[in-house]
Amino acid sequence: MTTPTAATTTIKSPTGTGGSPARLADDTAQGKTTIAASVVQKIAGIAAREISGVHSMGGGLSRTFGAIRERIPGGGTGASNIAGVQVEVGEKQAAVDLDLVVEYGASIVELARAVRRNVITAVERMTGLEVIEVNIAVNDIHLPDEEDDTPAPAPAVARVE
Amino acid sequence: MTVTVVPEPTAVPLAEQIAAVVTAHPAVAGLHGGIFGAVATYLPGRRLTGVRVGEGDEPVELAVVLHLDQPIPGVVRDLRHVVSGLCGGAAVDITVADVAVPARYAAELAGDGLVDTRP
């Protein structure tokens, strides 16, 4: 597992990358535009949650790492507080990794496709960055009878005294 | 006899003019210190975060927090146009450091249980 980049990386990529929508970087003579990773994270997080069937985000290692990273000074520069979304942002392109918990009953293949489509549309529309990939990890499935706020089962009463 | 020294009425510093123009844009939620907090102007008595006017050929630096109600490239273009106009056509480097998320999403995005305790 790679460590998500905390701050925005500014990649000087060669210009003219085929048919990519160079909507952001076409004004370099007048100054450059940098979009922070947390911007892309938030947009991707909102777009993923818009799809019904996504129960929550994060899970497994990413949640644990998120919790740890928040306690490291400087580790939380805008990038750690969005559960389940890791991004890499360059000058023209962005890559997104998502960790999902899905509702039981949703077709995971269809759901992942819809999430990917919505995230790509939202990030490209809002930031002008080309999304090169959206990797989706389904970490857990939420069962209908599984209450969110149920505390962990109380330790069984000792049978012997 | 007392001599009162009346300070010359100084013009509003350029950085403050830029800050005023930028924050007047409807899509701008506020100014930001940039990714490393280095985008700032040191004025007498205070520090103006989010605007840095370079010397000579250096670009003007701007770091903003935007609302998510319209696409970022358009907003950035507007800001660059208006700030560049104020600074005599200088290059303007703009960092979108963060976005202001509508309240209904904010709690969700932060995630509920940060530590997954399930096996």
Image (spheres, coloured by chain):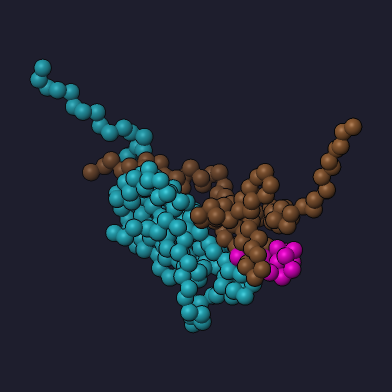
Q: Nearer the viewer, residue A77 or A80?
A: A77
Residue extending furthest toward the left: A160
Q: Residue A110: percent from the left, percent from the top?
A: 38, 62
Q: Residue A81: percent from the left, percent from the top?
A: 44, 48
In the image, A114: left or right of A104? right
Query: Which image quadrant: the C terminus of chain A?
Result: top left
Query: Which image quadrant: the N terminus of chain A?
Result: bottom left
Q: What residue do we see at 55% from left, 55% from top? A: B38
Q: Note whether A96 is above or below A92 in the view shown.
A: above
Residue B109 part of the magenta segment: no
Q: Residue A108: percent from the left, percent from the top?
A: 34, 58
Residue B86 part of the magenta segment: yes
Q: Is residue B98 visible?
A: no
Q: What residue do we see at 51% from left, 77% from top? A: A20
Q: Looking at the colours in the rendered structure, which chain would you say is drawn in cyan?
A: A
Q: What residue do we see at 31% from left, 32% from top? A: A151
Q: Quadrant of residue A29?
A: bottom right
Residue extending furthest toward the top: A161
Q: Note whether A153 is above or below A73 in the view shown.
A: above
Q: Is residue A26 visible?
A: yes
Q: Which residues are magenta?
A: B80-93
Q: Looking at the colours in the rendered structure, which chain would you say is drawn in brown?
A: B
Q: Quadrant of residue B114?
A: top left
Q: Quadrant of residue A145?
A: top left
Q: Nearer the viewer, residue A161 or B36?
A: B36
Q: Residue B31: percent from the left, percent from the top?
A: 62, 52
